[in-house]
Amino acid sequence: MKTDKYKILVLSDLKKTASTTLESSVSLANMINAEIELFYVKKQIEIVKGSKSSKNKAIKEEDESIKKKIETLIDPISRAYNIAINYKYSQGKLKVEILKRINDYKPDVIVLGQRDSSPLQLIGDSVTQFVLKKFNGNVLIAANENALVPNEKVSLGVLDGSCKIFKTKFHKGLMAHTKTPLKSFKVIKTQNEEQSVPVSKEVKTVEYVFEKNPNTITTLSSYLLKSNINLLCVDRAENNSKKFGEISLREVVNKLKVSLLVS
C-alpha cells in the first residue's frame, strides 16, 4: 500500500474547457487520494527590441500575466472542493517541455482535455498521442460533456475486456466510488466468438456486445452516452497488436465523446 499521495499531472491549454478538465482531475484525485499539479506551456516570446531593462520588463509582465490566468482558473475550483492545486508553467517547445515535466514530476496519472474538433487545438490529438507513446502510466482523457463530477460516484465502463486498471495500486479507491453494476462493452468479429471472462470479480458486471462493422464506433459512442457512462477504461494493446474485432486506440480517442482512462 502506498503511503504517500499519488500524483496527477494536468496538462492544460488554459482555454474554455480547462475548468471542466480540472474538475475531472479533482474528481479522480478525491477517489484515489492524489495530489494535483497543473502544467502549462507557453510558446517562447519573441525577443523584445530595445534595452535590457525593457526586455526584462516585458518578460516580467508576461510572467505575471500567465500566473494570473492560471490562478484565475485554479482558485475557484480549489475553494469549491477544498483541495490544493499546485501549478507550474514553462516557455518553450510544447512536447519538449511536457516530457521534461513528466520526467521530473513522475506522475501516476496524466490528465488531458479531450480533443477539440479544431486541428489547431493546443492540447489536441498530436499531444494526446505523444503522451500515450511516451508515458507508460495511466492517462485520463477528460471529456468536455458528461464529465466527472467531484464527490459524485462515477458510472464506469470497460472496453473489450480492459482489465489493467484493476491491477493498479489505486484501483480499490476508484471502485469504491463506482456505481454498480460495472458495464463492459465488447466488440467482436462474429457472434460465434467465445464468451469473455469477467473483467473484475469485485463488482457485478453487465456485458454489452457489438459486432464489428463500419458503424460500430458510432453505435458504441451513442450507446455510451445513452447509458450515462462518464468514464471508460481502455487498455493499450500489448506490443501494438490488435485482436480481431477490437477498435484501435486512436479511433477510440478521436471518436468516443466520453472520458477515457487509458492504462
Image: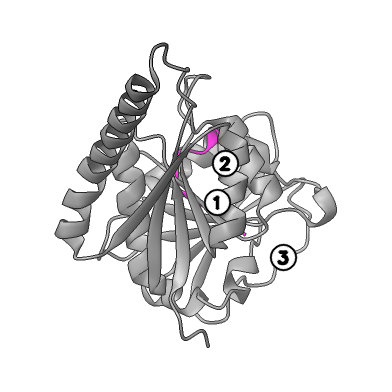
Q: Is residue 65 above or below residue 23?
A: above
In the rendered view, does 107 fall on the left or right side of 38?
right
| Residue 215 among magenta residues | no
**Which quadrant of the structure image shows residue 86?**
bottom left
Identify the element where label 2 is drawn: helix
On residue 263, the disc is none
**Camera-side mark, 1 or 3:** 1
Q: CA distance from mark 2 to mark 3?
A: 45 Å
Q: Which residue is mark 3?
A: 195
| Residue 257 among magenta residues | yes
Identify the element where label 1 is drawn: helix
Across and down, in percent, residue 130 comes to 65, 40
Pointer 2 or 3: first along the chain: 2
Across and down, in percent, residue 135 comes to 65, 53
The residue at the point 75 percent across, 45 percent down is: 245
Q: Which residue is mark 2?
A: 97
Identify the element where label 3 is drawn: loop
Q: Amino acid at mark 3?
A: Gln
The residue at the point 38 percent across, 44 percent down is: 226
Is disc 1 in contact with disc 2, using a CB cutoff of under 8 Å?
Answer: yes
